């Protein structure tokens, strides 16, 4: 075994140990950089004038109709936008296939050719699902026509797209590929002549950064990105919703989770792999705008509702002391959700015989979410008959003012009276007051 193979083996073992820790560490065990405490979170100033606009999408898994919709929508949004018009580049963060089959490459590339204009750069990378096929590099070069690891200059911004090479498993990268990423970042820093951000794109999250990264992150990326303050890193893989405020995290660089275009995944009581009602379909794009002095605006756009559902502004990526999207600062600005005074509850059975519990939603702080509800139901004798933490569908953007949950087919009895105790919990675990609601099962 060569020295490089030994190093690769050691890296794989370390990554495996981290994967074990994922099972015991809470999902909020992330980079809790202290930084400064701001009076308020940043908002985009009226005079912000970008010099580049990029559109990112990820985890499409053969849903090329959604890819087409995302591209077409981006052009429609920005062709005549003021004060800066146009889309300067598209980036796909991988998992455009299910198992890396060659047909998926061909179909995905055909969609790009049909919808991306010839003058707009489009760059794709591998995800772990492409790594499931041993021919991933051969297929990539054949169908995309460029190397899976590439640096593209767009309006003076270095855009580093990192596929990497599969290590011992689809979850690890080779040492040589990680060296490429490290050297590419350093080269981009060396040639910068102003304060422009450096954009890095890869499939998995850096571990312990954004929401979902303690389960779906890769610790191999962290030592490479750490300390490079100009870097704004974009990743997918987890399918965790982008409008959760934990989807952005700043420590010594900026990390952004870009959601998904197939389905959303969430956690419940720190257990990942949760798929509540409304999780599929997911269909969002990430819009990135930046100027030459280090300002960056990042917005999530929900294609299902045709609306922006999150908006983050970084005044200067080059100055760590100004970072506002640290875990601690975001947590401090979060507030406990509040139920309206006229909150009410009902319950009815759907066509499948399942009981649907419905109650008035709690209101989250501006820019924040209600992540879940702690629900307890008591019968007429005061006996507890149901208790669960129910994940809120905050990722579904609609006009509904009620939270609706399936609670089983044998939980309630028609005509009987029940008492509901419910608390709302925010992304940063701020709890509302417990409210008590009485209802009669219909």
Image: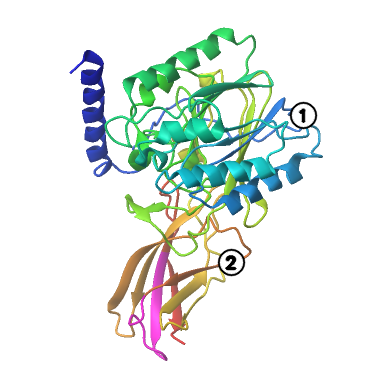
Rendered location of residue 293, percent (x, y): 66, 18
- According to the image, label 2 marks what residue? 401
Tell me where the magenta segment starts and ends, as one range. Answer: 408-422
- The image quarter in which residue 178 lies: top left
Rendered location of residue 101, percent (x, y): 43, 45
Indicate the secondary structure of the residue bearing disc 1. loop
Given residues 139 and 125, the one toward you in this image is 139
> Is residue 407 covered in magenta?
no
> In this orientation, does residue 255 appear?
no
Image side of residue 56 versus residue 140, left or right = right
**Residue 370 - label:** none
The answer to whether residue 369 is above or below residue 290 is below
Q: Upstream in the sequence, badge 2 or badge 1?
A: 1
> Is residue 417 covered in magenta?
yes
Indicate the secondary structure of the residue bearing disc 2. loop
- According to the image, label 1 marks what residue? 47
């Amino acid at each position: 075994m060569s020295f490089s193979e030994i190093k690769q083996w050691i890296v794989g073992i370390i990554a495996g140990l981290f994967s074990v820790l994922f099972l015991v560490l809470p999902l909020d065990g992330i980079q809790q950089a202290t930084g400064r405490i701001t009076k308020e979170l940043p908002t985009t100033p009226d005079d912000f004038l970008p010099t580049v606009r990029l559109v990112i999408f990820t985890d499409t898994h053969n849903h090329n109709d959604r890819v087409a919709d995302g591209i077409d929508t981006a052009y429609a949004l920005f062709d005549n936008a003021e004060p800066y018009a146009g889309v300067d580049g598209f980036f796909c963060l991988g998992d455009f296939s299910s198992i890396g089959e060659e047909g998926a490459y061909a179909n995905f590339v055909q969609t790009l050719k049909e919808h991306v204009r010839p003058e707009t750069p489009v760059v794709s990378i591998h995800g772990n699902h492409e790594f499931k096929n041993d021919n991933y590099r051969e297929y990539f070069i054949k169908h995309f026509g460029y190397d899976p690891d590439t640096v593209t200059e767009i309006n003076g911004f270095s855009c580093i797209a990192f596929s990497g090479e599969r290590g011992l498993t689809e979850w690890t990268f080779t040492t040589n590929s990680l060296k490429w990423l490290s050297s590419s970042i350093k080269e981009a820093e060396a040639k910068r002549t102003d304060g422009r951000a450096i954009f890095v794109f890869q499939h998995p999250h850096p571990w312990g950064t954004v929401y979902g990264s303690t389960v779906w992150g890769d610790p191999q990326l962290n030592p490479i990105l750490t300390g490079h303050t100009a870097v704004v890193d974009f990743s997918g893989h987890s399918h965790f919703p982008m409008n959760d405020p934990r989807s952005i995290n700043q420590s010594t660089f900026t990390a952004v989770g870009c959601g998904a275009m197939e389905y959303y995944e969430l956690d419940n009581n720190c257990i990942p792999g949760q798929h509540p009602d409304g999780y599929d379909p997911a269909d969002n794009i990430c819009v990135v705008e930046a100027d030459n002095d280090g300002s960056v605006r990042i917005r999530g756009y929900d294609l299902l509702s045709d609306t922006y559902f999150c908006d983050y502004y970084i005044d200067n990526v080059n100055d760590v002391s100004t970072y506002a999207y640290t875990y601690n600062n975001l947590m401090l600005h979060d507030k406990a959700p509040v139920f309206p005074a006229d909150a009410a509850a009902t319950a009815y059975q759907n066509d499948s015989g399942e009981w649907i519990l419905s109650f008035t939603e709690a209101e989250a702080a501006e820019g924040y979410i209600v992540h879940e509800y702690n629900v307890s139901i008591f019968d007429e004798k005061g006996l507890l008959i149901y208790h669960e933490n129910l994940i809120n569908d905050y990722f579904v953007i609609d006009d509904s003012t009620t939270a609706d949950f399936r609670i089983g087919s044998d939980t309630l009895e028609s005509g009987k009276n029940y008492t509901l105790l419910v608390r709302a919990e925010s992304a940063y675990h701020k709890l509302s007051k417990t409210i008590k609601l009485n209802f009669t099962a219909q």
